[in-house]
Image (spheres, helix red, strand yellow):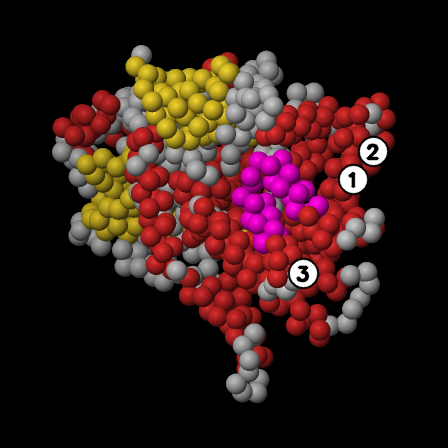
Amino acid sequence: MAAAGAARLALHDRDYRANALRDLRAEGYVDVTGRLARSPGRERDRDVLFIDVRSVDAGGEERPVRGRLRLSVPFARDGRGRLDLLPGDTVRASVRLGTGGSFRNFGGFSYERYLQGLGVHRRASTKSPLLVARIRPAPAGSPRTWIARARRGAQRLLERRFPAPDGRDISPVGAVLEALLLGEDGRLDEATVENLQSTGLYHLFAISGGHIAILNVLLFSLFRLVRMSRRASGLALAAFLVFYTVLVEGSPSVLRATLMTMAYLAGKHLWKDVHVLNTIAASAFALLLANPSSLFDIGFRLTYAATLTIILFTPPLLRRLPRLPPKTTELALLSLTAGLGAAPIIAASFNRVSLSSLVLNLAAIPLVGVVMALGYVFLPFAAVFPSAAGPPAAVLAFLVGLFGRVSHSLDGLPFLSFRVATPRPWVLAGYALALGLTLVRPRFRGQRALAAAAAAGFALLIVFPPPRPASPDLRITLVDVGQGESILVELPGKRVLLVDGGGLAGSPFDVGERVVSPFLWRKGIRTIDRLVLTHPHPDHLAGLLAVARNFRVGEFWEGRPAPGEPLYEELGRRLPRKAGRRRLAAGDRIVMDGVVLDVLHPPPADGPATAPPGNEDSLVLRLTYGQVSVLLAGDAGASTERNIAGPGAALGSDVLKAGHHGSAGSTGAAFLEAVRPRFVLVSAGDGNTYGFPSAEVLARCREAGARVFRTDLDGAVEVRTDGRRVWVRTSV
């Protein structure tokens, strides 16, 4: 069976990679035509469309192309951004195709695998909803269209009843209800998401298998109340779950839980007695048969790990513990046993351990059940009797606010939730093995106690991992942060420098929290010995805010300061009080762990700055280890290059990190002649609108005999040297 599964996965991967839309190459905007696969996904500043493409018009030539496209559509400036579209609508859109994945770093989250799990072959973006047009509506009489209209009507009702203060979007309360009732969590604000993640309660607000469990309890209680037979209850539950799965449009987590429930009900109906483990295995087999990429989905692993530990550990523990009313013991054990399976996966995938969830779930799960029950009654009631919907809306708002108070109740106890470095694979394997041995029939006295102690020991290693091994090499990694820049320098030994933290200007996406910090945690890094800011532009600075919050910082180094700049001032407030601050200028030389760091730019300041620092004020650093040198040019342009490449300048370097993301105004021919690099590294965002790196720069590098590595095509780039030789590898 394992061999058959591997073969099915290989065939699935082959078909996915051979897709014509995935391989299509086009410059600028192209016109795509296809059918909408699902309702537009709602986010705070954009809609997301999933289009089953049928044809592409590139350069005036339309040709048939099949594949699924994920299209990001920002709101119009006048607030008319919401797209009034339904699944099955045929649309035509003018889009810019993405050229690859996003944030492809070593050992990190694979966005490509994520898209593959959704059946998406390509992602794209457009500048305005005006570039998306419906050319043919969906069939009016199909059940799918009817359910989609009901879903859209429910969203509009929530927007009317729970509007944002500016009246253009939905309030935080409405966003929570939208997530709970409709499975649309894209409009939850950052503060809410961060709180729910830190307390371990996010699984209750992002539509998941937990919702199916809550719905099962609610419906069975209702059926018992009206004295329905067991057979009728099972059929009614199955019918509702099918409707609910369609309503949330096939959410993978809901689909998993629905299949589990349906398999269990079918087993009970056909064979009267069915083992729950067989039910789980059957649902997993069906899902993997349909989509083998689900195996790499974090939600898939979390669902089955938590379900397995609940089934295996809850009954024996329940027999040994006293029963506390009302169902307190059962709720506590469900929370505890689910955590036994899910916590290591969460620690490995999200670098977070939350102990507060063990306590908060006791209050949160029943409260969410009440909100969902009232919410599903409220939606049709408010649609039929809008004038009388005010009081129930106020009750729902109160209950959501009460949940917020519950989730914040332990904020004063930070030790209950903390970030951890990515556990080593052998630690996770040891934990799973020890946990499994607690269930094995004992062969000697004290076996289970010993296995439990071993599991506890491995759990401690997850929270407090062993120190990073020392390395004799210098490693410099250009992190894939999109259109920005961040460079990790690992010195021989264990000390590290982080030069810039990336950041997406004008976007709520936190690169420091979502990309840079996870990359450092996967490296086992918990302390940044030197945090370096080349210049205070958002695409270099913004990500450092999260890094300063998540890691211990020894010293902060910078070039020209930027007093009065909001992001810069916020970084200063987030730096630890004990962290030293040092201003670097041309002529400074620092020796650390055998590596010589020379500061080439900016020159020492003669007085206070008269303007905010710009690209030409960027730090330019040269690192030398043995016979190998690496030049980091920051965002320096032609002016800076001329200043540092004067007569007698020692710029020769094996590796050059190109200035200003490879813009045409940087990395000039004279500068390349002075540096004579063998390798040139460029940090640029996939499909960026600036045209970085410039074709001129790429041509100049080729003429200079340098090989170019760029993050938009190659993902993260690592340079490793022992002082004599240089090795370069990429994450793609």
Between 129 and 259, the one nearer to me in the picture:
259
State which quarter of the image contains the C terminus.
Answer: top left
Q: Secondary structure at mark 2?
A: helix
Please tell me which residue lies in front, 200 or 342: 342
Circles 2 and 1, Cβ within 8 Å, touching? The answer is: yes
Residue labelled with disc 2 = 392
Residue 405 visible somewhere in the drawing: no
Circle 3 sits in a helix, a strand or a loop, which is it?
Answer: helix
Residue at mark 1 = 374
Where on the picture, by quarter, is residue 83? top right
Q: Quadrant of the N terminus?
A: bottom left
For the record, the magenta segment spans 236-264
Q: Could you tell which of marks 3 and 2 lies nearer the N-terminus?
A: 3
- The secondary structure making up most of the magenta span is helix
State which quadrant residue 702 falls in: top left
Label 3 environment density (alpha carbons within 10 Å; few <14, some 14–19, many ≥20)? many
Which label belongs to residue 334?
A: 3
- Classify 485 as above or below 421: above
At label 2, counting other C-alpha atoms closer than 10 Å, the crowd grade (few under 14, some 14-19, many 20 or more) is some
Label 1 amino acid? Leu
Amino acid bearing label 2 = Pro
